[in-house]
Image (cartoon, helix red, strand yellow):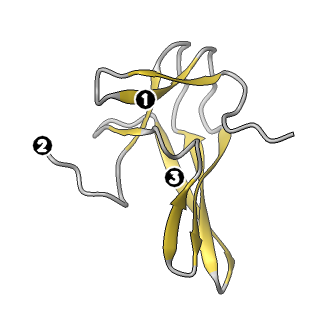
Amino acid sequence: MYKPLPDGLIIAKSRIHSQGLFTTKFIEGNIDLGLTHIVVDDELIRTPLGGFINHSDEANCIKVKETVSADGDRYTLFTLRDIKAWEELTIKYTFYEVKK
């Protein structure tokens, strides 16, 4: 059965920008939360998990690149540290320009 977000993750109002990705439970550091982006024919496609992650210079998550074939790559979201329940998940943007 397809689930757009892993158990314990929700989309909610963010103090950073509009909506963000939050956890409803404690998550340990170095946990694979799932697929955020895939590259198909040089086009970057976001999954629902990758669509609501906001930028932070002090991010608590990171995207990890995996080359799956000559045709493209995929990116998975990992926690960098322990994350408390109801904390927003963030990454340091590398695909997009951050406007300050």
- The type of residue carrying mark 3 is Lys
Q: Identify residue type, mark 2.
A: Lys
**Does dot 2 land on a helix, a strand or a loop?**
loop
In the image, residue 55 sits, relative to residue 66, either above or below, namely above
Query: Which residue bears the numbered disc 1?
Result: 20
Image quadrant where residue 90 sits: top left
Q: Earlier in the sequence, mark 1 or mark 2?
A: 1
Residue matched to label 3: 63
- The first of marks 1 and 3 along the sequence is 1
**Closer to the observer: label 2 or label 3?**
2
Q: Position of residue 14 (x, y in %)?
A: 36, 22
Q: Local crowd at mark 1 within 10 Å, few (<14), some, or many (≥20)?
A: many
Q: Residues within 10 Å of mark 2 (few under 14, many from 20)?
A: few
Q: Is residue 86 left or right of residue 55?
A: right
Dot 3 falls on a residue whose secondary structure is: strand
Query: In the figure, residue 60 lies in which quadrant?
Result: top left
Mark 2 and mark 3: Cα distance apart in space: 22 Å
CA separation, marks 1 and 3?
16 Å
- The residue where tag 2 is placed is 100
- Helix, strand or loop at disc 1? strand
Q: Are marks 1 and 3 in contact (CB under 8 Å)?
A: no
Position of the N terminus by quadrant: top right
